């Protein structure tokens, strides 16, 4: 029999059968391949469940360098564990958080992900596993600072292991600019002296006195440090515990309004903090208040501490250490329990903490870590941490309040205190939110 | 395959010749039902119908069901206690109304501006001017770029201190303005960026429609004494209505999906005050706050808005027999 096919022309039935057999084989093989592709797709596993998949948001600059050193150290120490490191950048941590939320929601847990411990863990209630064994085996509870130990506890066990701590109450400055203005940052001891210094910079130089992003999280962290400075540790703790004093909250907003209305740059609303920090590095700005991740960027740019840039405690917060902690969180239904346990042991170890923090601008939460690899600024920060009498947990980074409350506070700031500044609305919004 | 071939042969054998030269099937009503056009064509429309039904319409239905629960955080939603509580909360939420207002303003202003500018560009390029192909490419180029890229362009151009927009208005002694920071300006600035990107698309749609109008209509209008303005107003533009309707629907649907642009401009789900739209609010509630049920109710509102945009178009097309 002769059959005509518009694509293949004329062929015999035997040829056609042969072609069908080939197509059938190809189809079955293709389907099998597609199916195996689907199955191994996003989980990143190899079917055996022993690939360690870690999600984090350190994709650029100092963060990327710190992550490279950290994960490089891990693969050196555990060469047999297959590591699938997934940096997810964008939108601060918004893209990472979205990916984590999606994966956990669809029961597609990763081995571990970077996130804040403390109240921030509450949002993951029901999908976190217990790594108490990791803590016991590594003796982590005895070797880490108590604040980090407490922050990683969840539902009677441990759900995370800390990797490092940023300081939240530093005021960074460009040495040359403040010298030109005749300002001595070490002499600033309260908010009034800071405002006087900002005035001096404005009148004596062309530099912006204070660079500050109007991103809600950025305003929130500065609000917190202004409250600590002007109202004290106890009022701050009362506020985050839901017993805020309205007069203290209002006064904080009034002070912040004075600073933001007069001393920050015009492009604050449309610039992120990395762009503004670049202004400081270029000598176009005098001061910036940020977590000390900006120190990581100065270290990355090979700027000299004391010569190019400096840091003092935010005036009025001497003796305090504004506490921020990063950690690796452990999801339940873990695809690689044993490998993740090894990874978390490494996270809490001296090797892991040194590898990461020396580049990140943060300090180890592990106590007694040799400071040989840390620069002078970080060494001083480690000493300050040990000597600090008060360690207020950060309001803008998950330690003090849960994620929903933090989001509400940011909403209040975005709606009422991001130029123009409405003290009344912001005060009542804050009092209602916490 | 062998089974199918033997089935076809069997069916042919069963058919017998009718008196009028046709064939009649001896089998039952089931067989007659199987011979109906809709059933016989099922292999062609069935798979896409099922896929669309499952992945689109079932998902919308599921989204609606989810919006009736109180699902938040992680775990499984409780479908035993359904209610309209989320919609009630939504109606009382000032953030929802603000986002809805911004969405509607963006939708209307963006669409009207794109249609107007696109029409003007199309008419200009339809005339015998030099380098018209080059201009056409230049105007269309922004449309080919991703929102992520154009958003970064506009971030730079709107920069308060050294952005080109403030440099330009500065020539007239104005500004500098905080285009992306001032709550009164930010929505307008976002709309302007979107119009810049989409006017080229509208221009192409109009240009195609203009090219399909016979040249003798232009000549007839001229012979009848119409000047250029009258010729376009009375003769040409009325014939562009179908193109305008199609372009409007596409533009309005794009306006409802302006999320990407805002996300890229503001680096997150929380745009500056004055530019929050329903899409960003929905994302924030879902992935920022894990309020899945509440965000589903916002998503459904967006869906209803999309329907409101597309339904009149579909109805008109149906009445004209185009569907």
Image (cartoon, coloured by chain):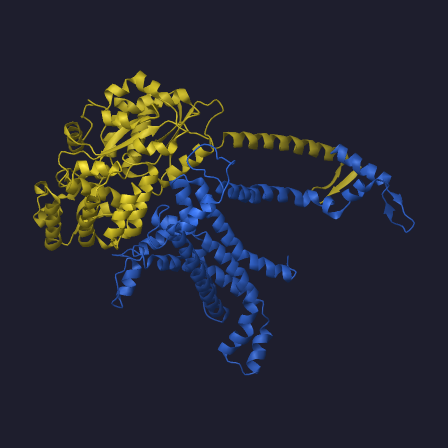
Chain colours: A yellow, B blue
Quadrant in which the C terminus of chain A appears? top left
Q: Position of residue A210 (x, y in %)?
A: 18, 48
The one of B217 and B129 positioned closer to us in this rendering: B217
Residue A105 found in image quarter: top left
The one of B191 and B157 positioned closer to us in this rendering: B191
- Number of numbered discs overlaid on the protein picture: 0
Q: Position of residue B192 (x, y in %)?
A: 38, 60
- Residue A38 visible? The answer is yes
Q: In the rendered image of this protein, does residue B264 appear above or below residue A236?
A: below
Residue A68 found in image quarter: top left
Q: Position of residue A1 (x, y in %)?
A: 80, 37
| Residue at 30% over, 43% down | A433
**Left-right relation of A350 to B250:** left
**Left-right relation of A34 to A340:** right
| Residue at 46% over, 53% down | B256
**Left-right relation of B260 to A303:** right
Residue lying furthest top: A137
Q: Position of residue B157 (x, y in %)?
A: 32, 56
**Left-right relation of B275 to A355:** right
- Residue A299 visible? The answer is no
């Amino acid at each position: 029999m002769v059959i005509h096919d518009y694509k293949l022309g004329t062929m015999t039935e035997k040829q056609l059968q042969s072609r069908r057999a080939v197509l059938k084989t190809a189809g079955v093989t293709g389907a099998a391949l597609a199916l195996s592709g689907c199955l191994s797709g996003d989980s990143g596993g190899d079917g055996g469940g022993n690939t360690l998949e870690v999600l984090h948001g350190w994709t650029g600059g100092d963060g990327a360098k710190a992550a490279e050193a950290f994960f490089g150290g891990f693969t050196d120490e555990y060469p047999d564990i297959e590591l699938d490191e997934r940096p997810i950048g964008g939108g601060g941590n918004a893209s990472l958080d979205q990916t984590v939320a999606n994966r956990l929601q669809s029961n597609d847990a990763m081995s571990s992900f970077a996130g804040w411990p403390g109240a921030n863990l509450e949002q993951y209630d029901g999908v976190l596993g217990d790594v108490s064994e990791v803590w016991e085996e590594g003796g982590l509870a005895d070797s880490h600072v108590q604040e980090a130990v407490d922050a990683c506890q969840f539902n009677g066990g441990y759900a995370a292991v800390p990797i490092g701590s940023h300081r939240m109450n530093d005021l960074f400055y460009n040495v040359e600019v403040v010298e030109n203005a005749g300002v001595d940052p070490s002499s600033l001891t309260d908010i009034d002296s800071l405002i006087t210094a900002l005035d001096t910079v404005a009148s004596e130089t062309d530099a912006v006195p204070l660079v500050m992003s109007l991103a809600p999280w950025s305003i929130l962290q500065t609000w917190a440090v202004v409250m600590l400075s002007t109202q004290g540790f106890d009022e701050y703790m009362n506020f985050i515990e839901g017993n805020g004093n309205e007069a203290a909250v209002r006064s904080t907003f009034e002070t912040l309004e004075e600073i933001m209305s007069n001393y920050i740059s015009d492009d604050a609303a449309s610039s992120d903090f990395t762009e503004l920090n670049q202004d400081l590095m270029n000598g176009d700005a005098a001061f910036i208040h940020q977590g000390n991740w900006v120190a990581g960027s100065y270290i990355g740019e090979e700027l000299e501490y004391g010569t190019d840039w400096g840091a003092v405690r935010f005036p009025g917060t001497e003796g305090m250490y504004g506490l921020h902690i990063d950690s690796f969180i452990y999801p339940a239904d873990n695809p690689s329990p044993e490998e993740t346990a090894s990874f978390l042991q490494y996270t809490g170890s001296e090797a892991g903490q040194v590898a990461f923090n020396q580049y990140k601008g943060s300090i180890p939460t592990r106590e007694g870590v040799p400071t040989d690899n840390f620069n002078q600024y970080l060494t001083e920060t480690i000493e300050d941490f040990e000597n600090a009498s008060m360690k207020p947990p950060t309001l803008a980074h998950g330690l003090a309040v849960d994620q929903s409350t933090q989001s509400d506070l940011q909403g209040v700031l975005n709606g009422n205190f991001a130029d123009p500044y409405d003290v009344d609305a912001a005060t009542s919004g804050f009092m209602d939110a916490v | 395959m062998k089974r199918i071939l033997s089935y076809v042969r069997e069916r042919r054998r069963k058919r017998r010749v009718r008196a009028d030269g046709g064939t009649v099937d001896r089998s039952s009503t089931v067989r007659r039902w199987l011979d109906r056009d809709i059933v016989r064509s099922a292999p062609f429309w069935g798979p896409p119908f099922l896929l669309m039904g499952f992945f689109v319409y079932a998902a919308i239905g599921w989204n609606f069901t989810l919006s009736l629960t109180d699902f938040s955080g992680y775990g499984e939603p409780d479908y035993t206690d359904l209610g309209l509580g989320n919609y009630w909360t939504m109606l009382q939420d000032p953030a929802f109304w603000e986002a809805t207002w911004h969405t509607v303003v963006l939708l209307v202003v963006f669409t009207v501006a794109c249609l107007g500018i696109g029409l003007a560009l199309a008419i200009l390029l339809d005339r015998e001017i030099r380098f018209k192909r080059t201009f056409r490419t230049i105007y269309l180029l922004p449309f080919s770029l991703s929102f992520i890229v154009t958003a970064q362009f506009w971030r730079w151009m709107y920069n308060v201190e050294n952005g080109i927009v403030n440099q330009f208005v500065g020539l007239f002694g104005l500004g500098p303005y905080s285009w992306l920071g001032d709550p009164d300006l930010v929505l307008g600035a976002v709309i302007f960026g979107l119009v810049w990107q989409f006017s080229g698309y509208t221009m192409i749609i109009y240009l195609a429609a203009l090219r399909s109008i016979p040249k003798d209509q232009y000549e007839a209008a001229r012979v009848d004494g119409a000047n250029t303005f009258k010729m376009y107003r009375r003769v040409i533009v009325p014939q562009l209505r179908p193109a305008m309707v199609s372009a409007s629907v596409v533009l309005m649907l794009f306006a409802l999906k302006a999320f990407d642009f805002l996300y890229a401009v503001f680096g997150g789900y929380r745009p500056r005050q004055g530019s929050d739209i329903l899409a960003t609010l929905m994302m924030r509630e879902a992935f920022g706050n894990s309020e899945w049920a509440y965000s589903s109710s916002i998503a459904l509102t967006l869906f209803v808005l999309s329907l409101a945009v597309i339904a009149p178009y579909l109805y008109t097309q149906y009445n004209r027999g185009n569907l």
